[in-house]
């Protein structure tokens, strides 16, 4: 597998332990000790273990095993697993991004324009059309500001959208 996985595991003791009780455990990945030293959760205080899982496994099996010093079983409060998302398209041309942000700011546009204007392609900003040519950065080719209630002068930043075909 070429996927990279990142794991965050959160622990906290949620009960007051009696003098004769203890909770201590270790984490194993595919049967091999993965994290040292043993986990000893603190009462109502979060301990977070984080790391990158090895790439060379087709399957990941995490197990939590109490140590010989423990009278109580392991406890997990939360586990997060992330993988990197590889986008097919690169980020929008930086000059186009600077221009459209300037236009948004000058006109005080309240559209839900967040993130990259053209990428990913399924989430192009409302009112924009973009071109996608191979591995080149996407470019803004059309800008529709109708029904935006604009007044005043035209933003000079529009001239920085050098691939614009429709305004």
Image (tube, rainbow, N blue to C red):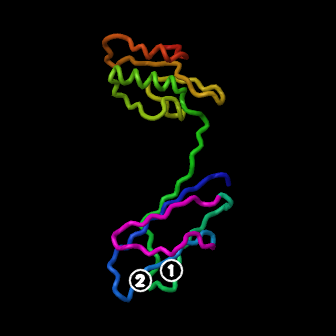
Q: Position of residue 109 (x, y in %)?
A: 34, 24
Q: Callout 1: 10 Å neighbours few (<14), some, many (20+)?
A: many
Residue 22, which numbered label? 2
Give me the residue at 37% from left, 28% from top. 111
Residue 2 magenta: no
> Which of the pair 84/37 is nearer the observer?
37
Measured along the vertical axis of the image, is residue 7 above or below residue 91? below
- Sequence-earlier tag: 1 or 2: 2
Q: Position of residue 147 (x, y in %)?
A: 35, 18
Q: Is residue 55 left or right of residue 162?
A: right
Per the rendered image, the range of residues in magenta is 31-54
The residue that mark 1 highlights is 66
Q: Quadrant of the N terminus?
A: bottom right
Q: Residue furthest top?
A: 153
For residue 11, what is the image quadrant?
Answer: bottom left
Q: Position of residue 26 (x, y in %)?
A: 53, 75
Give me the residue at 59% from left, 60% from top. 53
Give me the residue at 42% from left, 13% from top. 156
Q: Judging from the image, what secondary structure is the residue with disc 2 in?
A: loop
Measured along the vertical axis of the image, is residue 155 above or below residue 16? above
Main SS, magenta residues: strand
Q: Position of residue 86 (x, y in %)?
A: 59, 43
Give me the residue at 40% from left, 21% from top. 103
Q: Residue furthest front?
A: 37
- Label 1 close to label 2 by CB (< 8 Å): no
Residue 33 magenta: yes
């Amino acid at each position: 597998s070429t996927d990279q996985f990142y794991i965050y595991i959160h622990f906290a003791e949620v009960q007051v332990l009696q003098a004769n009780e203890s909770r201590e455990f270790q984490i194993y990945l595919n049967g091999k000790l993965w994290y040292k030293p043993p986990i000893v959760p603190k009462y109502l205080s979060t301990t977070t273990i984080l790391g990158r899982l090895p790439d060379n496994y087709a399957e990941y099996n995490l197990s939590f095993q109490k140590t010989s010093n423990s009278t109580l079983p392991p406890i997990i409060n939360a586990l997060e697993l992330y993988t990197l998302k590889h986008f097919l398209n690169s980020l929008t041309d930086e000059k186009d991004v600077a221009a459209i942000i300037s236009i948004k700011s000058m006109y005080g546009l309240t559209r839900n324009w967040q993130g990259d204007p053209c990428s990913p392609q399924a989430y192009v900003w409302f009112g924009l059309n973009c071109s996608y040519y191979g591995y080149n950065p996407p470019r803004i080719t059309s800008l529709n500001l109708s029904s935006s209630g604009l007044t005043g002068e035209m933003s000079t930043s529009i001239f920085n959208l050098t691939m614009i075909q429709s305004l």
